[in-house]
Image (cartoon, helix red, strand yellow):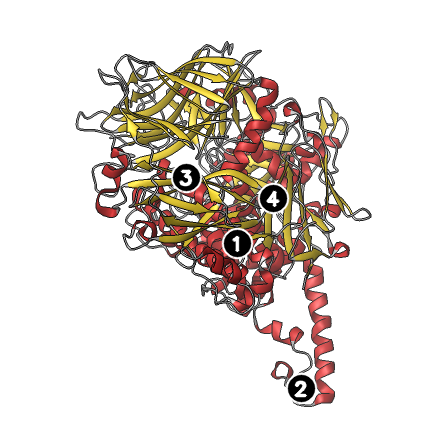
């Protein structure tokens, strides 16, 4: 099917010009060429002139007035991609008993209003909605919309599939969801569809990495609506609401600098000037014969508001008003009719009050702000902010740091689905030469993509929706959370199908029938029907590695019924195994859904972007490692080649960690604690804890600790040593050390959180150590750069701390660490969580929360997840502990973080397990899609097929300079096994993959530190066919490939 940009009746004219029945105009072969020529000329005249009016060309023609306060009216709607209603309900306007909102009616209503007057403008942001609406339109409406886009009246801002959250999202998922939206706009509207400004008006705090990503996507500015009330007051006082944000000061430098504006009035209109059908403000009544004639009043509000904001709070004579709010413009004429009047009457008296109102957009505001700042005497913007905007508080006792952890199961599921999505997309590229042989599933919804990779696009859309700031954040109603999860599941199933089928095709040699390969999705609770079946005596395990370098020392853990198994590697060599009993807690959680008594453990290795197949069969020689009860009072130790962990004989808690290579010893006490959620009245001084807000009623967390030792069992295996701990009937943990690994794994299980005592509870895992951290700790920004956090301090303003716990919580997307001169403790997470270090040497992560009250910010229900059985949600996750010197830790945690985020996919099959020799004759047991591995610090971030059969690839230098990062080079010639990159087709793109990097010329700004640079970092050298990457740089390339024979 054709993409949206080619749909409609006119597309037939330009794509089928050889037909004598051309467009139905004539059957005369001598005439249709003339008709075609005239139509093409008409198209060029109409569309060419329209296209010339978009972007900054449109902005230059706006009726601004030097010496006046120019008020840029920005008509907009903020359309949540799910929150109180599901994304479907919001689009269609269903379930209006919850909220009156229907996105389709907004777009239906706005388009004709824009056509009525060429001065009117409107911006739209969420492509998840706009794409749906576009698919429903006929050719005539699409042409009308293209004309409005070409004239700059309808402008797309931000352009992602959603307006993503910034605290709970990983940079990989952010880039992907932005790419889906931006590429749709590019292929549908061309240059005029390219957004020039980023627009995050509702996310609850803003990360530095988000700004860096936006800058790398080529945006000229970034606007947001929420910042801490103290920070905002300070910025208003010093006219510092707009600045040049230094988003990567130590690594990418000026390439990540971004003009950033905090909106004055969140994202709603000035007081008294809301004209939506749902607003209570008075319309502009300009009939002088009426008793309620109010032009002077309306104009007075506009003039006073303009001068107050311009003179007191903003620099230059340009200010912006956000004319809209949540799901507004369902009756767009009420807005435009009144804005027309307000503009007309205000401007008719402009010489008197020196205020000029005009329809505009965020990009045009940026354009004129930039122009005015460069005009003498000019304005120098602040250029010293290297911090972020977390945590966000809108009042003294309401820090929005609870959502960093809210809905932890969903946060974990989003992370796993993204892992699968990357695998799926990689296989579509590396196995593209066999894809035409695979009967892949389809989705009718994605008619604009090619048939043979529809599966990953479906998953990509579901992942895009899940990044919304009321989705992965955990701040939606429960029925909406269920809908998000179902969408992810549907996408994951399709991606698993395409992954399985493409691997089957790659396994099969000539003439062989591909073996069946399937996923087991409930291994976290030791459930896998194939391996648990008592009749399954043998099976294969195929491990696909999505990293661009060989993965060794990965451990496969499978539920089994027997107690002795033999495992052979792809070449037939014996592999060491270990069989342990399924823990009592796991048996309780899974109930009757699984029957395995044991878990089989063995190490595997898989090549870069490739797979290895292992053979498993029951044997008579027992490899079982039985758990033993610890002797009362004796300390317990587990160790491997790299680490030794000691547990206290009395309490059973982790007592010390020793790095055996560096002889570093860390004294530590690790345990679980809970904060009692505040049950206040939601007045300013007594806020409740809820989905958004974290507000404990005490500064001290209460320990979860029984009277006796928490250790219930110790397993001393050849491959893995572990200590099983039980802190309460609803909190347990298994601490593991695997052979050969430099980190310890702490698998925690929390829930159902009890609430019969009518107390909400927020559960943390805390590490109290002897590290002299000097009130400083470090957290990652969306999985990328690390930021220093200082207790009770903000970098750019003086903090009056009113909530000593919640006010020191920050998002932890992948890691948190504390350090002193000699040692560093790094804890990596498997999902986004909230974390802090409230005292020297201490580090804590919130793993689960369950409340009984709503915090009053709109959700209208408490965050009380009841789980599958209705008694409360049980969540299982993992923390990974690293101890090393500060100098060595960076490379270790970066490599581990990459391995955790891009974990291997494990598929199982019955064929060949009992006859490995015959299997190896018929099927491949090893395969790699790479001829060369990438350097250790270079990460293959993206490898996917594009709609035009080109390949999109992103390479990332994932080490910061402070971690020893250095420039890296990668030559593309001869890099991949199944295909060769056609070097002459390689094109370097912006990070969003929607614009050539050679054409990017971002606006330069006058700052207190000088003029900013407008050029971006470049990475591609066509002469040497080499990608050159500076520390933390991401290089985005698109190219054609030639399949190898």
Q: Nearer the viewer, mark 4 or mark 3?
A: 3
User: Disc 1 to disc 3, how far (Cα)?
Assistant: 19 Å
Q: Earlier in the sequence, mark 3 or mark 2?
A: 2
Work out whether residue 360 can be spotted: no
Work out whether residue 97 can be spotted: yes
> What residue is shown with label 2?
20
Q: Quadrant of the C terminus?
A: bottom right
Q: Nearer the viewer, mark 3 or mark 2?
A: 3
> Which of the numbered marks, if any, corresponds to residue 548?
4
Secondary structure beneath label 4: loop
Q: Nearer the viewer, mark 1 or mark 3?
A: 3
Front in this rendered view, residue 64 or 177: 177
> What residue is shown with label 3?
577
Q: Is the C-beta separation of discs 4 and 3 under 8 Å?
A: no
Secondary structure beneath label 3: loop
Mark 1 crowdedness (10 Å alpha carbons): few <14, some 14-19, many ≥20:
many
Mark 3 crowdedness (10 Å alpha carbons): few <14, some 14-19, many ≥20:
many
Front in this rendered view, residue 168 or 267: 168
> What residue is shown with label 1?
925
């Amino acid at each position: 099917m054709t993409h949206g940009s080619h749909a409609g009746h006119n597309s037939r004219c330009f794509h089928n010009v050889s037909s004598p029945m051309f467009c139905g105009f004539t059957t005369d072969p001598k005439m249709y060429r003339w008709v075609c020529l005239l139509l093409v000329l008409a198209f060029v005249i109409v569309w060419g002139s329209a296209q010339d009016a978009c972007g900054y060309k449109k902005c230059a023609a706006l009726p601004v007035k030097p010496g006046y306060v120019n008020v840029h009216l920005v008509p907009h709607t903020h359309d949540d991609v799910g929150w109180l209603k599901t994304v479907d309900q919001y689009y269609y306007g269903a379930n209006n008993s919850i909220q009156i909102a229907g996105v389709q009616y907004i777009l239906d209503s706005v388009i004709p209003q824009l056509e009525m007057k060429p001065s009117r403008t409107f911006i739209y942001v969420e492509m998840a909605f706009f794409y749906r609406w576009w698919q429903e339109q006929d050719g005539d409406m699409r042409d009308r919309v293209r004309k409005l886009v070409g004239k700059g009246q309808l402008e797309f801002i931000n352009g992602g599939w959603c307006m993503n959250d910034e605290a709970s999202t990983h940079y990989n998922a952010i880039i992907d969801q932005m790419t889906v939206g931006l590429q749709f706009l590019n292929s549908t509207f061309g240059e005029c569809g390219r957004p020039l400004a980023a627009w995050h008006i509702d996310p609850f705090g803003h990360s530095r990495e988000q700004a860096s990503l936006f800058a790398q996507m080529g945006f000229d500015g970034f606007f947001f609506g929420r910042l801490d009330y103290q920070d905002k007051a300070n910025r208003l006082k010093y006219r510092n609401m707009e600045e040049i944000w230094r988003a990567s000061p130590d690594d990418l430098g000026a390439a990540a600098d971004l003009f950033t504006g905090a909106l004055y009035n969140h994202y709603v209109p000035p007081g008294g000037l809301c004209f939506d059908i749902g607003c209570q403000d008075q319309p502009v009544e300009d009939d002088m014969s009426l008793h309620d004639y109010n032009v002077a009043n309306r104009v007075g509000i506009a003039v006073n508001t303009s001068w107050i904001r311009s003179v007191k709070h903003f620099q230059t004579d340009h200010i912006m008003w956000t004319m809209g709010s949540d799901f507004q413009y369902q009756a767009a004429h009420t807005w435009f009719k009144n804005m027309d009047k307000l503009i007309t009457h205000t401007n008719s008296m402009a010489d008197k009050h020196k205020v000029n109102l005009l329809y505009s957009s965020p990009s045009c505001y940026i354009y004129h702000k930039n122009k005015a700042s460069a005009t003498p005497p000019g304005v120098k913007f602040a250029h010293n902010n290297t911090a972020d905007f977390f945590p966000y508080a809108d009042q003294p006792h309401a820090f929005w740091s609870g959502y960093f952890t809210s809905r932890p199961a969903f946060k974990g599921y989003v992370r796993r689905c993204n892992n699968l999505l990357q695998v799926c997309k990689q296989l579509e590229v590396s196995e593209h030469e066999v894809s035409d042989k695979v009967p892949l599933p389809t989705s009718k919804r994605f008619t604009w993509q090619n048939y043979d990779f529809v599966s990953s696009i479906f998953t990509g859309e579901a992942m895009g929706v899940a990044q919304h700031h009321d989705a992965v954040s955990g701040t939606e109603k429960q029925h909406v959370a269920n809908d998000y999860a179902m969408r992810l599941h549907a996408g994951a199933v399709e991606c698993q199908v395409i992954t399985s089928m493409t691997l089957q095709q790659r396994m099969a040699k000539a003439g062989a029938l591909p073996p069946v390969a399937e996923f087991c999705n409930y291994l976290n609770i030791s459930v896998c029907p194939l391996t648990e079946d008592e009749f399954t005596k043998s099976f294969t395990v195929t491990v696909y590695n999505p990293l661009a370098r060989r993965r060794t020392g990965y451990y496969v853990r499978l539920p089994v019924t027997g107690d002795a198994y033999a495992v052979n590697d792809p070449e037939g060599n014996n592999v060491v195994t270990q069989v342990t009993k399924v823990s009592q807690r796991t048996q309780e959680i899974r109930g009757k859904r699984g029957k395995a008594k044991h878990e089989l453990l063995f190490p595997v290795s898989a090549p870069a972007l490739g797979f290895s197949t292992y053979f498993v069969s029951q044997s008579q020689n027992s490899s079982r490692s039985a758990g033993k009860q610890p002797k009362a009072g004796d300390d317990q130790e587990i160790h491997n080649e790299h680490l030794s962990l000691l547990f206290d004989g009395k309490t059973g808690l982790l007592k010390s960690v020793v790095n055996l290579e560096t002889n570093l010893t860390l004294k530590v006490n690790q345990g679980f604690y809970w904060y009692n959620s505040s049950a206040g009245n939601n007045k300013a001084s007594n806020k409740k804890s809820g989905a958004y807000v974290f507000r404990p009623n005490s500064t001290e967390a209460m320990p979860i600790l029984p009277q006796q030792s928490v250790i219930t069992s110790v397993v001393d295996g050849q491959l893995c040593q572990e200590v099983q701990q039980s802190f309460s009937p609803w909190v347990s943990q298994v601490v593991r050390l695997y052979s050969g690994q430099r980190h310890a794994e702490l698998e925690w299980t929390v829930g159902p959180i009890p609430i019969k005592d009518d107390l909400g509870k927020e559960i943390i895992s805390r590490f109290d150590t002897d590290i002299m951290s000097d009130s400083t700790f470090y957290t990652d920004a969306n999985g990328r750069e690390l930021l220093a956090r200082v207790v009770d301090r903000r970098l750019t303003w003086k903090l009056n701390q009113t909530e000593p716990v919640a006010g020191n919580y920050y998002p932890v997307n992948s890691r948190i660490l504390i350090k002193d001169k000699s040692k560093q403790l790094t804890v990596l997470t498997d999902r986004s969580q909230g974390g802090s270090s409230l005292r020297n040497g201490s580090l804590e992560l919130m793993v689960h929360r369950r409340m009984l009250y709503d915090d009053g910010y709109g959700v209208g229900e408490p965050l009380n997840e009841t789980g599958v059985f209705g008694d409360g949600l049980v969540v299982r996750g993992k923390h990974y502990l690293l101890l090393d010197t500060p100098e060595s830790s960076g490379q270790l945690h970066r490599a581990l973080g990459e391995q955790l985020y891009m974990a291997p996919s494990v598929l199982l099959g019955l064929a060949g397990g009992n006859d490995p020799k015959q299997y190896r004759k018929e099927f491949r047991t090893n395969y790699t899609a790479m001829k060369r591995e990438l350097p250790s610090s270079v990460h293959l971030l993206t490898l996917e097929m594009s709609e035009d059969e080109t390949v999109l690839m992103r390479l990332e230098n994932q080490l910061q300079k402070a971690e020893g990062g250095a420039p890296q080079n990668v030559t593309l010639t001869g890099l991949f096994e199944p295909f060769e990159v056609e070097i002459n087709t390689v094109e370097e793109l912006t990070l969003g993959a929607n614009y050539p990097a050679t054409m990017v010329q971002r606006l330069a700004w006058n700052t207190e530190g000088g003029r900013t640079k407008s050029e971006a970092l470049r990475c591609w050298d066509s002469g040497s066919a080499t990608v050159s990457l500076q520390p933390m740089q991401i290089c985005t390339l698109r190219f054609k490939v030639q399949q190898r024979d």
